[in-house]
Image (cartoon, coloured by chain):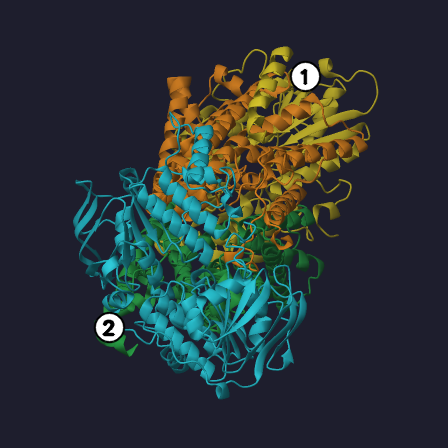
Amino acid sequence: MSTAATARPAPGTGRRLLTALGTATPVYVLLATVLIALALTDPGFYEADRLLAFVKRAAPLVILATGQYLVIVCGEFDLSVGAIVTAGVVVAAQLYASFPALHWLVATLVLLAAGGAAGLVSGLVTTRLRVPSFITTLGMMLILEGAVFFWTGGSPQGALPAAFRALGRGTAFGWLPWAVPVCLAVGVGAYLLMRADFGRTLLATGDSERAAHLSGVRVTRVRVTAFVLSGVAAGLAAVLVGGFSGVSAQAGQGYEFEAITAVVLGGVLLGGGRGSVVGAMAGAFSLQALFTLLNLRGVSGALESTVQGVIVIAAVGLGAADYSRLRRRRTRSPDTRSPEGTTR
Amino acid sequence: MRPRSAPLTALAALLGAALLAGCTSDAPADGPAAPSAGGSSAAADGSGDSDFFDQAEYDRQLELAKETPEGPKGKPWEQMLRPEFVSTTAYAKKGGGDAHLCFSNAGVFNPWRQVGLKNMRAEVELHEEIGKFTVLDAQGKDDKQISDIQELTGKGCDALIVSPNTTATLTPAVERACEKVPVIVFDRGVETDCAVTFISPVGGYGYGAAAADFLVERTEPKAKILALRISPGVDALETRWSAAKRAFDKAGVEVVDAKFTDGDPARTKSIVADALIRHGEIDGVWMDSGATAVAAVEAFEDAGQEVPPITGEDQQDFLTAWKEKKLTAVAPAYPTFQWRTPVIAALKILAGEEVPKEWTLPQPVITEADLDDYLKPGMPPLHYAMCGCEELPGFPEKWGGKE
Amino acid sequence: MTGDLLTAPGEKSAAPAPRPGRRLRLTDPVTGVWLAALAVTLLGWAVVAAQGGQFLTTTNVVAVLQNSVALGLVAVGQSMVILTGSLDLSVAYLISLGTLVAAQTMQSGGVLLAVLATLALSVAVGLANGLIVAGLKVNAFIATLGTAFILRGWIEDQYTGPAGQVTAGFQRLGYDRIGPVPVSVFLLLAVAGAAWFLTRRTRLGHHLYATGGDEHAARLSGVRTRRTVVVAHVLCSLCVGAAALFLAARLGAGAPWAGTEARYDLESIAAVVLGGTALAGGRGGVAGTLGGVLVLAVLDSVFNQLAVDPFFKNVVRGVVIIAAVALYARRRTPRRRTA
Amino acid sequence: MLTMQGVSKSFLGVRVLHDVDLDLRAGEVHALVGENGAGKSTLMKILAGEHVPDGGRLTLDGTPRSFTHPAQAQAAGIGVIHQEFALLEHRTVAENVFLGREPGRFGLVDRRTMERRTAELLGEIDETGITPRTPVHTLSVARRQTVEIVKALASDVRVLVMDEPTAPLAEHEVARLAALVRRLAARGLGILYISHRLREVFDLSQRITVLKDGRRVTTLDTASTDSAAVVRAMVGRDLDAYYPPRARPEEISEPVLTVEGGANDRLAGIGLTVRAGEVVGVAGLQGSGRTSLVRALFGAAPFTAGTMTVAGRPLRPTRPREAIRAGVALVTEDRKGEGLALRQSVRDNALLVTRAVPGRTRPPSARGAAALLERVRLRASADTQEVQYLSGGNQQKVVIAKWLAARPRVLLFDEPTRGVDVGAKAAIHTLVRELAAEGLAVLIVSSELPELLGMSDRVLVMADGRLAGELPAGATEEAVMRVATGGDGSGPDQEDAA
């Protein structure tokens, strides 16, 4: 390495920054742009309480994106998270219909456990039966939605008490929405997890299952764990969504696609092995900020999805283009050689 | 041979079969009637709200809403407005025996339809003369409902009840069915009058206008109104909106935003919160249906603002919030008791009794005054109060409620 | 993704070359799914008969066939993109828009113009999808999800409900039948036959499989892989256009939710994998897809007969899809260890 | 016939080819040699139409050409056999051979013609083990290569570029390939032969062009030069001492790895001992069970019978994880597919094992990781760089570092220097010997007999899944081959049932 250092031109700060941001660069640019646009549209956006309210609103998507990131980065998909959120809210309502005195913490834990259980099943089916996770979780989505409504006869039967809803709706000390520290905790937790041994082996598994296996990684367990964590994250999102907006039979509708979009927007490679969890969370924030911007600018409700579609394609398209250039630039330091067999 | 030639062989075989069997059509014998504009709905051929506005129908509905219905008191599902009776002796079931009723349902994809179907099943239970009750669920697919109707006409039903998924698209299938069995259409109409009776409450204009008039009454002129709609393109909801828009325009009230919520409470809260930021304050909230009314109320609370006059629907959670939070509110209803009526109508038809050609049910509006009559404690949050189901067997457990 | 980890790649002992004979292989997914369709039919017949009903009546057969058409057309198109290693999530919105365009054009400009307009729309959307996937190198999942959003916005902004009017003559496509066979089934068979011929017998078809099997290898062999992906997307959209035309004929008008409420996007993908086509591309085919569609349709019919709760149907469908793909995965595991 | 003049290529400002000239005559085998990164691959990709050169001219039979897509190069008559085969595993041989140029009219594929012509082409090169309808995934590596060659022949190529064609082949297959190459040259094809193996180069070629750092160093007539001269041109210095000195007897101590009666479906009656400080070579033909042996020891394709001990403790690994825990490490033959997570950084790869198998050793700190990489003499610009951008030799060093981090007792190498350039090769050899000297037990499988004989303290020879014999250090290649082939020259036909 010492020989290399002399041959290499010292990278500029800009380049070093780009390298540090890595594949997620486009999402940070997007996030910054949208945040600036928000500031121009609505100068009050950056007042503390407004900003906290924004984070609170974004929290469920950020948490779902974090879970989804874990699954995507090890080379899989989780299409069932939206259904888990819906099922979670309905199950909570159903629980309270039967046990009105249930402590909120118990209900929350039940939801987290149930989400984890759904993830466990998806993970086991994907790894043990070798069903592509796209299909497994698609099936899981049908099963969960069907089962939960079959059970409740179509709509939830109970209401959610204020204590349970506090996490999604209430505030601590009268100013800090509980969802914010929860979101922060998940974010920090996921960041640390990805820096820890588990995170590194997860990435390696997504990159090359064979290499990971032959290096002693328990790939099945790692993958299943990712699914379980994604399920738990969805369970937590269900608590927040249920808390934020109360009982609804379609609480999680569309969340699976939003979460995947957020993760991909965050520069994470579908197929696994590359991308950072911070990028994924930034993707979720960008998406939510975009929704808010469209709301505040009064874009016709109907055209909102068109704008969303265009921006997602453009951002990901630009990301793909940008990224390959960045990669080449980094590659061509004199002592390293042309990528071999990377075109696959 | 690998199955590579299978499709070709199959094609040949089918062609052969076709030649032997001859050609038949499931389209109505006289060809599909060109649906005329008017009736209870109008097909839109472009954008804009005005496509859904039909002045004559609008006027009619507003008048009907004021009239007192005929029929037994306290049983709104048997009441009717301005009935024009038609004879049904041609359909009278000959000989005794149990009746076989069939029902092609658009789906149970929302709580309103779920409550409705429970009402209908309970009504069926009331009548011992109904031997068999077959329900096919189209799960919201027009295409499947067309097939379902075709399937049901071939099943020996004595009468066919249809709750169409879409107005325009089911017309040919219903026309075809009319040729074989007496058909009862309810909720949404179809663009044909071949059905023996069409059952529906007063309609979307009545609903939308009732809500809008309430807001106009409770707010200052130049008030800022936020309109929350579920999703575009649903005819019943579009008529509600067009009537409301008309009322607002007339009164000079400003609709600052008309947004689609997708029926998602989280989205609703975001929209209301953002609207509060954009416009400073909101003086009234109009909703085209009640599913997300509570979320809207909460959004005001979370923003630390007083809840302005708001319209909702007869859903339990909204009525509860109304009472507990002492809201200024009104709840027009699109009553679920209408699901009972088709069964009653079917039995009348099979007995040869006359029924109205258009069986227009009353469409009560819940106001402050009669809120307590409709709010039943112990019912689930997504229950619809105006179900007319209190006396039905299995109430309230079957509806998910508690004594 | 889950290869056999235990075998040394350099020493894959070759299985005896398959005999050149063309016997029916039961392990072939295509055979499997058609057998499954048969099995489901027999099972349905038995269960319905046990309940005192009749399953194989004309009415039911017509319903099964009729219900297969729209999904079948979409799934055939979807098979072609999936074979190429891509995916199309925009089909549902394209169907909706297709029915609207068809019905409206027909009202003002006649059948031929309507058909052309719908197909032109399809080509445009397919081209956009293909170019975004192959040109901008956006992952197909995201790219087509993006176009789906764009189409959705367009529909919601432009249409407020059913629009247009289909001519009486055109409606016959949706309602006429020859004996128990609806004419639309012939449309499906024609499209499927064309797709089958295209994938199996033409250069383009070979390139579809090649691109899906190993894009890099295909490119090195001189296959214009990007062009192939674009063409696959256009073909898929054309099939979807055909489905839209059929639905327009059946519905008599255009409906903005014709495609989305039936979830044609996910259902078509489910049908394709049920038919044994690998989601990763390169393996499978149209014949299997038709089998997959038939299984779903028969299943639906059985549910109808037994008056199964619609929510419970979803549970069963989910289980069936997972189980089927698990079976394929098992079969695909080569029995290497017996050498 | 083919000439390239002043060909240059840069990737965003970094020049990887400088004014390279090359000419290829019809009927000639022209070898292209150079260390990894010398520019061979880029040159080849320009010929194949995968890269567009920035400058220079390419003429074929006097006509200037420029390609922007592989299809154009093919149409011009240039065929390329890539190191990684461009074959579709689930398609038949015929479909692969004619991929991209299927016979037929109006866009239809004439299957019958396609299969007939494939059969003819196979016949022309005397390949009887392959039928046109065989799916490629059932073929052995050597046969797949044959399919690749047939694929090139099918498009009437005039120029055939072969990139390390012998890398995946066993010795007897190499001989077959050589015969085939000569035949093709005799038919008038110009063959550009890229290889690391100088012996083959001297065996086959008429001329040798040496590339270094993107420039052409020289073009030599094979007949009038020797390998020392070529190596000098490649590395710019003499490399006399190819192999480090072997272990002295006193450096070899107690047994670390023992196996008795080891067997599974590919192996039978395996009994061996490797001692601390010792480097043991395993020779044998492709398919003789060499790779199966190391994979069994590593638990990747476990023994189903027999006993095994590591450092005196019994071990019967059924998964790599168990072997790793006991201190067994395997450097696999497929570096990119099995050895590395290519998109991860150098450091993450180096630490993968210690992270995945906690308890054996704790993952080293950042400084510890850096020391580890220095230990294997890795040359990389930063240890946060993704390994896919390293040269083959450096990648292999990362793999070795990964195992050293876990402090193994037994190091198994499968083809340790495959696809590694000459300079890195020597570094790896030295490293292996150092590790042995530190008390590790080392087992090396290699198809390169000179390497095996040069490195090993003794050589085990495998045939048919059994240990057929043991030879001392300094045995000759002929002696090894005699044991490997059954001693009586029953011949290299004794290959796998492929």
- Nearest to the observer: residue B169 or residue B358: B169
x and y, in percent, of residue C206 in the image: 44, 36
- Nearest to the observer: residue A76 or residue D152: D152
Q: From the viewer's perspective, is residue D411 above or below residue D183?
A: below
The secondary element bearing badge 1 is classed as: loop
Which residue occupies 70% across, 46% down?
B399
x and y, in percent, of residue B330 in the image: 54, 45
Neighbours of disc 1 within 10 Å: few (<14), some (14-19), many (20+): some
Q: Which residue is mark 2?
A: D237
Which residue occupies 80% across, 15% down?
B94
x and y, in percent, of residue D11 in the image: 23, 57
Q: From the viewer's perspective, is residue A125 above or below residue B259?
A: below
Q: Is residue D444 left or right of residue D24?
A: right
Colour in which chain D is drawn: cyan
Q: Which residue is mark 1?
A: B180
**Amino acid type, label 1:** Lys
- Nearest to the observer: residue A115 or residue C85: C85
Q: Is residue B116 left or right of residue D400?
A: right
Colour in which chain C is drawn: orange
**The furthest residue to the bottom:** D250
Q: Is residue C65 left or right of residue A45?
A: right
Colour in which chain B is drawn: yellow
Colour in which chain A is drawn: green
